[in-house]
Image: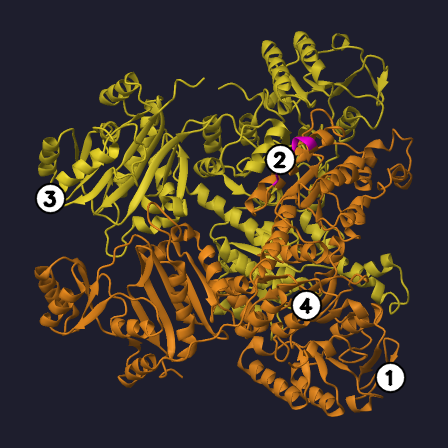
Chain colours: A orange, B yellow
Amino acid sequence: MNENPLHLLMNPKSIAVVGANNSIVKMGTVMALNILKQGYQGKFFPIHPKEKEILGFKAYPSVEALPEVPDLAMLIVPAKEVASILERFGKIGTRSAIVITAGFKETGKKGRDMEKEIGETASRYGIRFVGPNCMGIINSQIALNTTVLPMVKEPGSLGFASQSGTFVSQVLPYLRKRGIRFSKAVSLGNEASINVVDALEYLGEDEQTKAIILYIEGIREGERFLEVARRITPHKPILAQYVGGSSSGARASLSHTGAMTGPDFLYDGLFKQAGIIRVYSIEDLYSHGWTLATQPPMRGNRVGVITNSGGPSSTIAYTSDSVGLQVPRFSDGLQKEIRKFIEPYASAANPIDLTFDLRMENLTVTLPELIMKSGEVDAIVLHGVMMTGYMREVYPHFKEMAGNISLEEFLKLSLPIVPGALELPHKYKMPMLISTFFDWEDNYTTGYRDTNTPIFYCPEDTARALGSLYRYTKIKERRPFSKINLPTTNGLASSLIKKAKTNGQKALDEYAAKKLLASYGVMVTKEELATTMEEALAAAAKIGYPVAMKACSWEIMHKSGKGLIALNVENEAGLKTEFQNIQKNAGRKEPVLIQEMLKGNREFMAGMTRFAGFGPCVIFGLGGIFTEVYNDTTLRLAPLGNADVQEMFSDIRANKLLGEFRGMPKVATDKLFQIIQAVGNVALLHPEIAEIDLNPIIINGAEPVIADALIVLEDNTKP
Amino acid sequence: MNENPLHLLMNPKSIAVVGANNSIVKMGTVMALNILKQGYQGKFFPIHPKEKEILGFKAYPSVEALPEVPDLAMLIVPAKEVASILERFGKIGTRSAIVITAGFKETGKKGRDMEKEIGETASRYGIRFVGPNCMGIINSQIALNTTVLPMVKEPGSLGFASQSGTFVSQVLPYLRKRGIRFSKAVSLGNEASINVVDALEYLGEDEQTKAIILYIEGIREGERFLEVARRITPHKPILAQYVGGSSSGARASLSHTGAMTGPDFLYDGLFKQAGIIRVYSIEDLYSHGWTLATQPPMRGNRVGVITNSGGPSSTIAYTSDSVGLQVPRFSDGLQKEIRKFIEPYASAANPIDLTFDLRMENLTVTLPELIMKSGEVDAIVLHGVMMTGYMREVYPHFKEMAGNISLEEFLKLSLPIVPGALELPHKYKMPMLISTFFDWEDNYTTGYRDTNTPIFYCPEDTARALGSLYRYTKIKERRPFSKINLPTTNGLASSLIKKAKTNGQKALDEYAAKKLLASYGVMVTKEELATTMEEALAAAAKIGYPVAMKACSWEIMHKSGKGLIALNVENEAGLKTEFQNIQKNAGRKEPVLIQEMLKGNREFMAGMTRFAGFGPCVIFGLGGIFTEVYNDTTLRLAPLGNADVQEMFSDIRANKLLGEFRGMPKVATDKLFQIIQAVGNVALLHPEIAEIDLNPIIINGAEPVIADALIVLEDNTKP
């Protein structure tokens, strides 16, 4: 395995910057100042054609004039100059770069060509770079921050790979207020050299990083992404936001970083398969990520809620239920213990509602400790801790009563933080989150924040963050992924495809499609192809009435509603009539498929489709007429293991139908697994296949049987 | 119509407070201070047995000693004293009260009894009161705030009825920071006298209130709530959060305000029927409410997004799509205009991404104005407006370069707010929201905030708030509700119920249930009841084969899987066999229902159930075996108008099935409407009916026919 390029890039002993000067309105200068003022201890070499000194450092007139080869080159220069400057760094031996400059792929054809050029130049010299069109990097371990805004100085534990520069830079003041601190962060820009998969891999290996968050507009290496993420998620959580899956989102992303997006359900399936927790807002990405980076695992799904007010109790309880957690009623014994510390009218059952009270001992130490020790919950939420924030608020009203004392004097009357309060969650190694309407003007809020207890300004958000924490517990419990061995290519399958291609077909006909599938060992309907009435009668006699009859031609991809199908044909007379009808409706002599008529009220579907940047993707879901009504499907990348397919089974909303249901037996899911796996394998073994659609797969008794099959071939006539 | 009690209570010319003293740790004192310091101009009478003066005001030793009859009495006294103090106020003629005291219904039996007592005492004297167990009221119009925390002084336009005191009081500092200001707010507590429906009605009538938000843990007057809300929503938006619908939420709510909760789908249906926008967090309740209170209507669903960074562009676009909005590509003409003002590599298509730039003219005036004038969007989101917030952030880095100037001097270098920026959205009467990672340390953020342009700290939240704004546009477009006239009670129906009750039945048998329904004009299967084989054969001959056969007894409520049903019976021989089988499986002689065998792949269901505090509720959804798989149902309160049922049709996810579908004709929805409406009418006309379950309703061709029916009677043997 090659070393990840970010190991070198993120840890430079020296940095050369091209594009900074002494004007504070220039972005290059702002970034250079960020490098210099945040505590970075490496060497700093500004390059400038005219200035002798930049920001107090000796400036060099050219790359060649540098006193030594810098580990990292950072370029904030016009787009057309990037390639030649990269080349000069390449020549002197620099191997890492950050290209901040925008105006490449995201702007159209000309930009794409320029981007290709800088990629090729870099490759020539073995340079790996971040960008172009990015905000650079943050490595809090060496106090390095190349973005436009200062970061908090204390190193953090949250790793971030972002396809948006804003979410690494403009957001830093917001993150500081919430106490969220990066270990490492990379603004990836257009990914001409280093991409999101490289960054993910790097963060997975980075010991400082305890949880990884990804902001994604498009992934170009789908299979490698899956492979890398699958290696990481068993021991380190990954959360991701994906925004390329809607039409507006896709257009915005294209013009943002030139990202090639894919449909939402593709990324949804990819994330599920990789064990990645998906979130839907940047706020959740940071705050759930921070929760996972700082909190110990949640062993079960039980939440204890302690508040000084009823509204947050109810909203946290409701939201906990909605994300798969529970707020269990405490045991009588525990309630009795709790009762000693609360007002007689307050609730001890969970949530505990102390009602408004400014003495914080009970809320912050006595009760949480009692509950942590009880073993009755797996995480705790506190709402309503407050002291100086509250005092500040009421000061204008109390000022006069208190002899017109100053705010400072008044705040001195605040009770100090209860000893042990901030240390408590760490002492018992139990996740704890804080919900508050006060913020960093309050000593408790800042106290918890600065000791790695996440703060939320909306009570419901605590429950949602715990939902992600518990999701990760379930992800860690997944069976480990093991390599899947593909079967050998079946000769019959290859020849069926070859024959169809030779004939100029764009698809296999149903009969051939099923033969191909059957050659990989899955169950299809018993059927025979009849070109004459006599053959049809013979076939039906052999299969047994009732039969289904279908016109069979690769050119008829969707048969329903055209009079080309007859179901439940009961006898010879019926067969004769329908044979003629089908021939008539087809408008020409077509072979007719005579098929056993399956009985079964449960119908599923399986399919395969390909997306740019991804291998074959397998789709499974509810089939039959409800396919398009509920769109109840799930997707995974091939090849599929048993664990993948088991998760597909539980993904679909109609999963009840797989078990015993209304007098019907449990579905033979091992056979259904074989079908779904075969779809992926066939696609991998036969790259000439563009699409597969098996719908319906009828559950005949307990046995899944493929009742209709469509296999579309790659269109080689397209450019 | 009686005058709403809150008209009087919210506008007192004088307030007497029992329970305040001169100690600032006492809640009564904190509340009294809030009344005195927020600018309330009415009279203030503290009552105290010993003190001569409280907070600088003359104190009176008793209610009777007051110099005049106060308009409003406020009680913060021990629970057991409330009734007698209320009585004394009643005797002197006070007619409004606020009971802050907790420890009533929410604590159990003893508290319930005490609460009943105070309710009765108040009634005796015509007193209406808010509480007990509440935080009182806010009326910003007269600067009255009885809660424990100060509010912002400027009157607002958001009305709030809350079943949580915290959400009216503890939250005030948070709301101030976000610029969200109440017109009126009521903390309802246990609702022993004035309830959430009274408060809703009051806010609906209040001219200062432009949008209403409700925090709900349980409603006791479901039908009145619907009636009142329906009057309001055509001209004033209502948003609601409901948290009683989960098991933990219900328990939390019970111990909080003793609220009687109902299932989530009940409230969901109620809100939809009333035209109330449901939200799922208190943050959304405030911020979406504030958006609706301050922004003009959104005429269509088109959003223009202008940012200085690509990440927020993409997330806002994605989220817009997900809430039913669109971010349309601007016309070529408009893009050409926009191009004049942006960097060549920036996107002009929508979202517009200016990329990082500190000159705010383009972002805050030039481009939004261009777009507002274009008529190509219905609302605008700006992300990235910033000046002093940014300057503060970078000051530590720039300080030295700028000759060690002070922060104050440095901030003076900031460009002033661009003239016209803050006024722009009001000038064009177009909704505009701001997304920012800076907050009230930034002059733009505070500037917009203080001129009623809502601020969001998470870009996606702007799109979600616009989603609610657009929802309200659609709600206003609803057909107005018109009173529904019930049919007259059908004599046959009454006699069927009477007969069943006389027989001691807990339900009607299927045959009788269908007769009852048919008597109200809806279509049921053709069927005859047979007690002998001969009758069965004759019935089948009359109806025509194939037939369905079912054991018919009120005691067999769920027949499937017990051998009591035979479908598709083809001929006499089959009928004979099945008749014997059914008799055998029933274990005794049961009448057998001989039914026409309906053909149809589409099955729906309709039903009725009752919940405490609500009238009959009608449920409609997908029927047949998928009922329990997808749980795809929707609920409304009876009686149902055509508009209600049309909305039920569009509510269900399977609504495609109602149209032309896979060669099947469009469902005769007028007839389906009749069935659903009849379910509600029958429940209203026959209160002896506890439950109705019609499943399946088979679509036979285009016609809906009730194929199975269960009518359960009220169990009068229960206490």
Chain identity of mark 3: B
Q: Amino acid at mark 4?
A: Phe
Q: CA distance from mark 1 to mark 4?
A: 28 Å
Q: CA distance from mark 4 to mark 2?
A: 52 Å
Q: Going by the image, does B68 lie left or right of B482?
A: right
Pointer 4 with pointer 2, Cβ within 8 A: no
Mark yes or no: residue B243 visible.
Answer: no
Q: Amino acid at mark 3?
A: Asn
Q: Describe the element under mark 3 as helix, strand or loop.
A: loop
Mark yes or no: residue B499 visible.
Answer: yes
**B494 shown above or below B141:** above
Q: Position of residue B68 (x, y in %)?
A: 73, 11
Q: Amino acid at mark 2?
A: Arg
**A584 shown above or below A114:** above
Mark 2, residue position: A329
Q: Is residue A330 magenta?
A: yes
Callouts 3 and 4 in the same chain: yes
Q: Describe the element under mark 1 as helix, strand or loop.
A: loop
Q: CA distance from mark 1 to mark 3?
A: 105 Å
Mark 4, residue position: B356
Q: Going by the image, does A573 lie left or right of B216?
A: left
Residue B119, picture quadrant: top right
Mark 1, residue position: A52
Badge 4 crowding class, 10 Å Cα cut-off, few under 14, some 14 to 19, many 20 or more, is some
Callouts 1 and 4 in the same chain: no
Residue B697, picture quadrant: top left
Badge 3 crowding class, 10 Å Cα cut-off, few under 14, some 14 to 19, many 20 or more, is some
Q: Position of residue A219 (x, y in %)?
A: 55, 71
Chain identity of mark 1: A
Pointer 1 with pointer 2, Cβ within 8 A: no
Segment tinted magenta in the rendering = A327-333
Mark 3, residue position: B571
